[in-house]
């Protein structure tokens, strides 16, 4: 849902969708501004650190997408970080933040234009 | 009716009194307050045309509404610590009216004007009316002045508008109008009560049972419904109103006497009162829904954690076991003996039979646990599970693959090793036999060749010696081949790595050394004899004749003896048949040999006859040409004759053994030819169950798969029987079997594959049930999905490859274009349905994708919202509330983990549910 809004016209061409792409992202903010994304998961949850929401008109908009899996924070591997540790590192990151993310080509976000209108109609196999 | 008048009068006079007490404008209001009054009381219809005649004619209507609306207003005003007594007088200043609207809406109205002048009041009432109009209600013909003047009908009409807008309008059941919605709610809730039939909001409620039924339906402990009777309306109404007031905090708004005595109770009053029931109960229902949602999320979290623990434990155990086991399988060291290898093979058999099968089951459990977990996480909108480093599914799969490779390599190596050692053992036996024969022949030969006897013998003796030497050299030539054979065998033993090579090599060297020395010695002696030939001359024809025939015959005897004692290894009936044929050929040559033997014996006899005839004795009787005697030949001949039947017997034994082997092959083939198709049929059965969603419900699939699994248990003994036969086959050194296309290895693979595919199928069905239930997919929809999926699953693998999947989507109306954009779209879909990039789409991923719009977006926000409902809209919650609303274990779970609420105005013991909810999901907004 957000991804449609997020892609700014100046963004580079969509990454190769066939494979997940590893992307370096640099975010910048003014003092007292939030990054504008929701983080979920972490080593203590035994799940991948993942971006679960991106706020419009925030530093994260256009840079991060829902579903992005965070691999490094400011150049350091984040696999062993607990949720709280990762949150802390990101919060305390000053006015710039560097992330390496793995992005699965986000199908749900961009597929509205190909979905059938209304409920899918099942063709009758064999008829 | 008479009584109604009296009551009405009483109230009117009462309200007049309170009006007189309440303000200075009593007099000025007085006229307008009674403007409509006389017509009303006198029943002069023609003067009141603008009012609904029936309503207007029935004063009961007005009395009931006044009572009910007053009570309804007070049920809100009490929250602001105030109340009204007379609905017309107490609202006319506009102040309490504004307060009422603020309490009801929870919104602030403009500041009221404090003055007591008429225009202040009009302004205040207008502010209230404007607020109502802002809420989307059109107030036709209600003017502020009439309210200020205390017009009863206007006031009641306005209050009804407020009630409709704020208490009833929001009631929507299945998109009906508010009134119909409220009626439908009553009908549904009272449906189980046979003596209640709600058709309207007047007569249907007159006997009181409908109120009692509504209370009993939601709070059965409050009313003993079975004891109630239609014939006691007053009792029923009083009971309902008392209980509602005491336990549900709904004030009395209706008068039981009015309800019973009036011909038709006032519809608006009854609706107002019933709407209070609706709000009381639907609030409880909301809290219950919220509590259920919280419980569901907590339970999902706890179950996910359990599954993660299970996965981690299984992965650790399995990896540790593989790590322990692989070196054992990769160890190719051996003591180079057949027994040693046989022990290792037995150990390996125990491993395959007892140790590996439970591990295979653990691996299947591990995989299904992982799939279930990821499905559950996806369904509850959580990030994907990330196992500890090194315990990814791919790590397990790689380790397992490595193990199976090691296993295969180990068994191949061991069988080859056994074959090699077995051949070596036989080769060594052959070597020992040939060496023994040769060494016996060599005995004394060197000394004989070194003898100087020819220097002191007679001519004849010398000639004999010379001839003897010629014969010896011929013999030597004949033995050359045997020495070469011995060397060749020793060489083979060396190249095949026989374990006791030292003794082999030293013995072979001794033989070769002696042989070389003997060659030199014989050359030397021949030359010496030829030098002496000139000097000596003597020849005994008979002896010569004997010697000439005896030597080759003797050689033949040695050869025959050697052949008869020859060891053989054969692996088939054909081979032993050809041995038998060779033996028959040998037997056919026996008569000729016997003739030769007799001839030689004849010559010997002639010598003796001649000597006897000529009276010769001593040296003359000794054959100078050869050391062989007829007696010696006779002994060897007897030996040969005796060994022929022994050879017959051992060949027959070998034939029997080969037939036994053939029986084993048949026995194995009979079992394998049953087991192979059996397993294949079950594999087909599993795959047809899983692709048969057309007719079979998921539960039925689950049942049938379990049935096959039970069958498998029953069939296990057949596999064990095959393992036993296979062991006998390996022990009999049988390496091929032309009677069955199946080997033990292919049966094992099929058997394990069957186990695995059943486990996988069961897991898939379980995941589909999970998904169906959690997504609220109906059985019909599930069947449609299954039909569609199967139609495109041309390969019947229960997976769609990308091409099949794309065709499927297109047929379902997805617009995937045949260009670059279309490719990208499809690639995105694949990434969604096949995150591990296996190149295949399973049924559950397919359904998940098709229903992705249906997924209930499960987020921390929703749980926070649910807690807020339990907390009565406060930003914190207390342990009392949690214990009241949640099951004990879940309540304690929350209380232990919630931190104190840090916001302002928090009472002691307030807990922070917002942070807690975020922690459940591991969410932080950054």
Image (spheres, grey):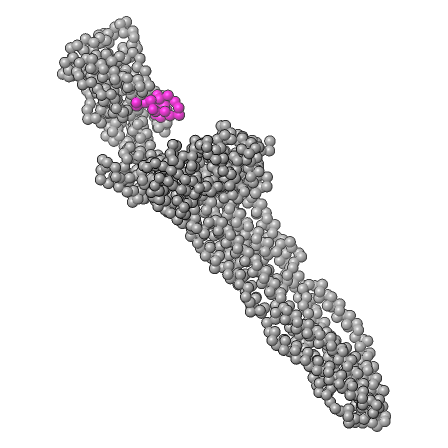
Q: Position of residue B536 (x, y in %)?
A: 83, 91
Query: For the magenta stretch, what is the residue range?
Result: B166-186
One can see residue B2 in this view: no
Quadrant for residue A123, please give it: top right
Count numbered badges in the picture: 0
Question: Does the magenta segment cover residue B182?
Answer: yes
Q: Quadrant of the N terminus of chain B?
A: top left
Quadrant for residue B516, please give it: bottom right
When the figure is inspected, residue B167 is found, relative to residue B771, above or below; the finding is above
User: Residue, x 22% and y 17% (percent of image)?
Assistant: B124
Q: Is residue B831 left or right of residue B422?
A: left
When the figure is inspected, residue B427 is found, relative to residue B711, above or below; the finding is below
Quadrant for residue B337, please give it: bottom right
Q: Position of residue A78 (x, y in %)?
A: 40, 46
When the figure is inspected, residue B302 is found, relative to residue B78, above or below; the finding is below
Q: Position of residue B681 (x, y in %)?
A: 59, 47
User: Residue, x 29% and y 29% (percent of image)?
Assistant: B280
When the figure is inspected, residue B524 is found, relative to residue B126, above or below; the finding is below
Q: Is residue A81 left or right of residue B506?
A: left
């Amino acid at each position: 849902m957000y991804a449609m809004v997020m892609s700014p016209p100046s963004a580079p061409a969509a990454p190769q969708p066939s494979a997940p792409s590893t992307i370096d992202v640099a975010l910048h903010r003014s003092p007292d501004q939030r990054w504008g994304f929701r983080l979920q998961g972490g080593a203590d949850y035994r799940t991948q650190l993942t971006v679960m929401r991106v706020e419009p008109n925030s530093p994260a908009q256009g840079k991060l997408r829902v579903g992005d899996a965070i691999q490094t924070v400011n150049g350091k591997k984040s696999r062993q970080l607990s949720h709280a540790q990762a949150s802390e590192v990101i919060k305390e990151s000053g006015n710039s933040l560097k992330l390496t993310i793995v992005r699965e080509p986000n199908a749900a976000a961009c597929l509205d234009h190909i979905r059938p209108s209304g409920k899918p109609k099942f063709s009758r196999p064999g008829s | 009716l008479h009584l109604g008048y009296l009551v009405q009068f009483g109230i009117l006079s009462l309200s007049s009194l309170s009006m007189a007490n309440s303000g200075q404008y009593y007099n000025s209001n007085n006229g307008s307050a009674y403007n409509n009054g006389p017509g009303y009381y006198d029943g002069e219809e023609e003067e009141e045309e603008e009012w609904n005649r029936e309503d207007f004619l029935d004063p009961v209507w007005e009395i009931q509404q006044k009572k009910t609306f007053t009570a309804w207003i007070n049920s809100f005003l009490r929250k602001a610590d105030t109340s009204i007594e007379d609905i017309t007088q107490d609202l006319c200043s506009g102040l309490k009216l504004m307060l009422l609207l603020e309490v009801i809406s929870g919104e602030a109205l403009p500041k009221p004007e404090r003055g007591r002048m008429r225009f202040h009041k009009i302004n205040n009432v207008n502010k209230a009316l404007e607020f109502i109009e802002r809420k989307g209600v059109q107030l036709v013909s209600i003017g502020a002045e009439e309210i200020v003047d205390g017009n009863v009908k206007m006031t009641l009409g306005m209050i009804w508008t407020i009630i409709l807008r704020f208490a009833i309008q929001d009631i929507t059941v299945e998109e009906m109008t508010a009134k119909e919605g409220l009626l439908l709610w009553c009908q549904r809730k009272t449906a189980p009560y046979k003596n209640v039939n709600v058709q309207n909001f007047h007569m249907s409620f007159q006997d009181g049972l409908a109120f009692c039924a509504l209370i009993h339906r939601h709070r059965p402990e409050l009313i003993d419904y079975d004891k109630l009777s239609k014939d006691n309306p007053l009792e029923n109404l009083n009971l309902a109103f008392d209980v509602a007031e005491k336990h549900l905090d709904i004030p009395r708004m209706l008068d039981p006497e009015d309800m019973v005595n009036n011909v038709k109770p006032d519809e608006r009053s009854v609706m107002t009162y019933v709407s209070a029931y609706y709000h009381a109960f639907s609030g409880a229902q909301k809290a219950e829904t919220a509590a259920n949602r919280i419980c569901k999320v907590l339970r999902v979290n706890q179950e996910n954690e359990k599954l993660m623990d299970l996965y981690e434990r299984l992965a650790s155990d399995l990896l540790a076991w593989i790590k322990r086991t692989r070196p054992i399988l990769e160890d190719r060291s051996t003591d180079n003996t057949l027994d040693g290898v046989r022990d290792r093979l037995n150990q390996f058999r125990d491993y395959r039979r007892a140790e590996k099968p439970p591990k295979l089951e653990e691996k299947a459990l591990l995989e299904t646990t992982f799939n279930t977990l990821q499905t559950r996480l996806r369904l509850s909108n959580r990030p994907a599970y990330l196992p500890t480093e090194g315990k990814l599914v791919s790590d397990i799969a790689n380790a397992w693959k490595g193990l199976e490779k090691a296993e295969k390599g180990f068994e191949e190596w061991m069988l080859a090793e056994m074959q090699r050692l077995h051949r070596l053992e036989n080769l060594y036996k052959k070597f020992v036999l040939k060496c023994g024969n040769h060494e016996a022949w060599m005995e004394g030969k060197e000394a004989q060749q070194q003898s100087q006897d020819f220097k002191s013998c007679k001519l004849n003796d010398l000639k004999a010696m010379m001839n003897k030497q010629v014969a010896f050299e011929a013999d030597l030539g004949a033995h050359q081949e045997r020495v070469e054979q011995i060397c060749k065998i020793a060489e083979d033993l060396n190249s095949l790595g026989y374990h006791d090579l030292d003794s082999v090599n030293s013995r072979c060297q001794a033989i070769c050394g002696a042989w070389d020395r003997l060659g030199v010695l014989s050359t030397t002696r021949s030359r010496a004899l030829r030098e002496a030939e000139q000097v000596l001359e003597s020849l005994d024809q008979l002896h010569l004749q004997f010697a000439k025939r005896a030597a080759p015959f003797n050689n033949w005897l040695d050869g025959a003896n050697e052949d008869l004692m020859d060891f053989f290894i054969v692996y088939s009936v054909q081979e032993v048949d050809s041995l038998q044929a060779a033996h028959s050929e040998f037997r056919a040559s026996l008569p000729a040999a016997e003739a030769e033997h007799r001839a030689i014996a004849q010559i010997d006899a002639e010598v003796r006859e001649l000597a006897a005839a000529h009276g010769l004795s001593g040296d003359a009787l000794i054959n100078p040409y050869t050391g062989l005697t007829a007696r010696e030949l006779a002994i060897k001949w007897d030996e040969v004759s005796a060994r022929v039947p022994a050879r017959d017997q051992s060949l027959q034994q070998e034939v029997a053994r080969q037939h036994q082997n053939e029986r084993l092959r048949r026995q194995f083939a009979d079992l394998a030819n049953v087991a192979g198709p059996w397993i294949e049929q079950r594999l087909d059965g599993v795959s047809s169950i899983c692709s048969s969603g057309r007719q079979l419900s998921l539960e039925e699939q689950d049942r049938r798969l379990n049935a096959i699994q039970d069958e498998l248990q029953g069939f296990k003994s057949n596999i064990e029987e095959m393992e036993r036969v296979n062991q006998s086959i390996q022990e009999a050194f049988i390496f091929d079997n032309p009677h069955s296309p199946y080997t033990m290895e292919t049966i094992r693979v099929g058997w394990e594959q069957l186990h695995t595919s059943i486990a996988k199928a069961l897991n898939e069905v379980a995941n589909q049930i999970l998904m169906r239930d959690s997504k609220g997919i109906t059985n019909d929809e599930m069947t449609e999905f299954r039909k569609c999926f199967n139609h495109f699953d041309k390969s019947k693998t229960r997976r769609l490859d990308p091409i099949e999947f794309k065709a499927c989507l297109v047929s379902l109306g997805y617009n995937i274009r045949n260009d670059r954009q279309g490719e990208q779209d499809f690639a995105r879909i694949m990434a969604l349905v096949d995150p591990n990039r296996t190149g295949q789409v399973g049924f559950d991923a397919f359904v998940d994708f098709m229903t992705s719009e249906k997924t209930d977006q499960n987020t921390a926000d929703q749980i926070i919202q649910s807690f807020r409902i339990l907390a009565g809209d406060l930003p914190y919650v207390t342990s009392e509330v949690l214990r009241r609303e949640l099951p004990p274990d879940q309540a304690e779970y929350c209380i232990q983990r919630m931190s104190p609420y840090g916001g302002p105005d928090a009472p002691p013991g307030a807990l922070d549910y917002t942070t807690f909810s975020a922690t459940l999901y591991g969410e932080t907004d950054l």
